[in-house]
Amino acid sequence: MDELLRRLRAGLPAEALITDPDVTPSYAADMAGLCPAGTPAVVVLPRTVDQVRHVMRTATALRVPVVPQGARTGLSGAANATDGCIVLSLVRMDRILEVNPVDRTAVVEPGVVNAALSRAVAEHGLYYPPDPSSWETCTIGGNIGTASGGLCCVKYGVTAEYVLGLDVVLADGRLLTTGRRTAKGVAGYDLTRLFVGSEGTLGIVVRAVLALRPKPPAGLVLAAEFASTAEACAAVCAIMERGHTPSLLELMDRTTVRAVDRLGHMGLPHTTAALLLVAFDTPEPAADLAAVGELCTAAGATQVVPADDPAESELLLQARRMSLPALETLAPATMIDDVCVPRSRLADMLDGTAAIARTYGLTIGVCAHAGDGNTHPVVCFDPADADEARRARESFDAIMALGLELGGTITGEHGVGLLKKEWLARELGPVGLELQRGIKRTFDPLNLLNPGKLF
Amino acid sequence: MDELLRRLRAGLPAEALITDPDVTPSYAADMAGLCPAGTPAVVVLPRTVDQVRHVMRTATALRVPVVPQGARTGLSGAANATDGCIVLSLVRMDRILEVNPVDRTAVVEPGVVNAALSRAVAEHGLYYPPDPSSWETCTIGGNIGTASGGLCCVKYGVTAEYVLGLDVVLADGRLLTTGRRTAKGVAGYDLTRLFVGSEGTLGIVVRAVLALRPKPPAGLVLAAEFASTAEACAAVCAIMERGHTPSLLELMDRTTVRAVDRLGHMGLPHTTAALLLVAFDTPEPAADLAAVGELCTAAGATQVVPADDPAESELLLQARRMSLPALETLAPATMIDDVCVPRSRLADMLDGTAAIARTYGLTIGVCAHAGDGNTHPVVCFDPADADEARRARESFDAIMALGLELGGTITGEHGVGLLKKEWLARELGPVGLELQRGIKRTFDPLNLLNPGKLF
């Protein structure tokens, strides 16, 4: 421990190290519940690539594990400390190094906050689509580590599709540059993509070249109420089958609608079994909304309310954004699932989740990126009640099992971390798992980078 | 050899093997010039996954290299045989197993021809964007192996963005399933993406889940003539900077325009130094073309001709599609480069290429996916003239060096194969190359899969 600190200090300014045992535990965990977190030996907050390299060289020399962190808004425990580790927080490397409107690229450090990047590129008429709920606080490095999604994905895709190239400090301190600054490029294996979603287990991202898009027009939102989730899901299928490209296609189930209304007093009808929100950011969104409204009515919508202007649209989106906080008011604790199924199986996923809630005698509210088939069932429970906590965990697992059974995946956008390690093994199977481990060994033979995460 | 054939025959129907030494050499090479090709021991044409697994188990047991092939339309020698290898041609595995308009996915075998898939999904109102020039003959498996591009990329991206999941037979015959059938998914390292562009060096793709899009409206094309490539490139930059999203943005230089006109008698003016083709497949393409036409004029276009209807548009596209065949008429042989630069450096790339042509005393015509910054300089030469052949090779290399100097890549969409191995090493650098080799060893420890390609 003394040796570790002595060596770290040799290449870092004093203000880059936190060793105060009253402070370091506050860096021990991300926002996932029920995941174990150890006590870090030291928290390091570098400002330069060279400082990161020094940390990794030191960690390798002394065989000390390193847990990289962004803003710790993750939901799978991927940023949780292990005992005696170096927590490597990248939040101070927060410079936007370049924004190029012709190339439609930005070059950023990992600690740049998602919203800060979005605002900076908007000044150039550009748009960085990935928009996790935590976008006001989460960092681009964290987004890359967990391959974040958001509300935008149905039209604009996930973080992975916006990462063109990376500078990465490897476990032994060497610097790797992957990918490109160009619109296209196929030189060798796609190492860039390998780092996206690798949860800090392969290297430390210290710089990223990101693709940008032209800023779309402001969107217009429609709300449609249904008397059953099956009808709402049928509307989702019809919308996609007819070739529409909404910029947002979200679903909130009855439990979520009620919770949001109780928290926000928004006048949402408690009789609604499923609320669908559909947005278009096309040049003529009203026409698109009208067409989609008809499909919703045909699928059985009890009410269809297109917003007249951006202010009304914003109000509807607020309801959606309030879903998680609202569900969190229903019980002392929540666990949020992240199962993504083929959208043709969305109705089965929602019905099955409702059945699981009944079986385990729990409240489970679902909000979903319905256009992607990505559901977020939120299990509400009291951890002080041992039996309820057990049922919560079992229902959480039952939801993942159902997702796999329906041809889906255990994680659409939140990642694996500590929370879903066993499930990752089930989803990948033994051959896939073996190859994933082989890749890990290639990049980090001493297993120092975020050990114990993923698998 | 006898042992190899005996073992292969044990798990394959007789018609799946070609051993006739008059026939096997016709499978020895793809369409790249100047790349060495060996003599295969046997050509195998399996129809099932089990047959592929049998081939790989046999190859592993006897330590025989395997060269996987699609339609051999590749341009980098990645499908070239090595002496004594098994050529594993996937062209008979050509079934489209599923097309799902709600999920917007297709499940296909690797031997499906790109155009066949495009037509099949069009019947469902769907669109498979990747459109390499060879789309009428090239296979999806080959497209995946080389991470193909095409004219669509400026709006719709490359093959990699459409591959959601894969079934892969590994070197030892084990079957690996990667990725997903869902719109999103982040479970573990992205092995799917690792296979895209891996040129058959990591495993044999035997099934692919592909993402589809709604079929866009028919496009409308505009042609703009410029008196200099610099002005044409300035127009490209202006179009992209103003936030336009053309479905096609192509450039042909003077040499290409003249060659096309000589071949096709299309009435293209020989005074044009650069011809820009811009298409939109938006609901109102005429308005978009008008806006872009103004940008071209402002950048110095000598003439701007928007097509009035799809038939006129098709005629303009024909000129672009004729570029390579036309340039091939200028000399006994050609070498086609594939350098992609940031689009803000496109003018430097074209001017630099013209300077290289002068320095080496060669005709080099350039057609470019200008919107992507992806240039295809075509070096025209006579291989019978040793000095000219040497100059051709040197100019080809000088063009790649220029691309790297401008922050670009040696390959935007054609891949590395045998042709650019040395250049891949230069682009990746020693750390990147070492990690790429480590990944290769993880998947193929005996180095049996397409050995000698990439690196």
Image (cartoon, coloured by chain):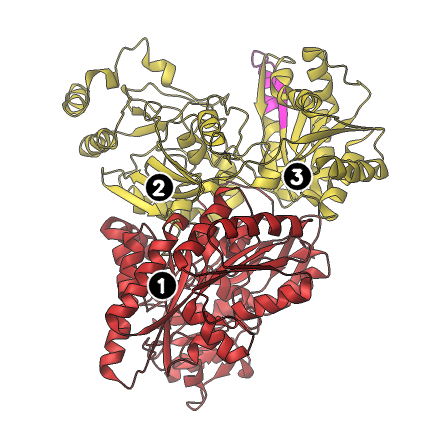
Chain colours: A yellow, B red
Q: Earlier in the sequence, mark 2 or mark 3?
A: 2
Which is closer to the viewer, label 3 or label 1? 3
In percent of width and height, residue B247 lies at: 57, 54
**Cα–Cα span, label 2 and label 3:** 32 Å
Q: Chain of mark 1?
A: B
| Numbered tag placed on residue A282 in the rendering | 3
Instruction: Tell me the kind of residue under disc 1.
Output: Val
Give the quadrant of residue A374: top right
The residue beneath circle 1 is B416
For the record, the magenta segment spans: A377-392
Instruction: Tell me the kind of residue under disc 2.
Output: Leu
In percent of width and height, residue B364 lies at: 35, 71
Q: Which residue is at the far top?
A: A22
Would residue A93 be found to the left or right of residue A239 on screen? left
Give the quadrant of residue A200: top left
**Cα–Cα span, label 3 and label 1:** 39 Å
> Residue shown at 50%/41% (left/top)?
B187
Identify which residue, B242 or B224, lies in the foreground: B224
| Numbered tag placed on residue A136 in the rendering | none
In percent of width and height, residue A53 lies at: 23, 33
In the displayed structure, A322 sits above or below B193; it is: above
The residue beneath circle 2 is A166
In percent of width and height, residue B47 lies at: 57, 72
Identify which residue, B261 or A98, lies in the foreground: B261
Would residue B387 be found to the left or right of residue A372 on screen? left
Tell me if I can see residue A220 in this picture: yes
In the displayed structure, A11 sits above or below B113; it is: above
Tags 1 and 2 on a common chain: no
Q: Which residue is at the far bottom?
A: B22
Q: Secondary structure at mark 2?
A: strand
Q: Secondary structure at mark 1?
A: loop
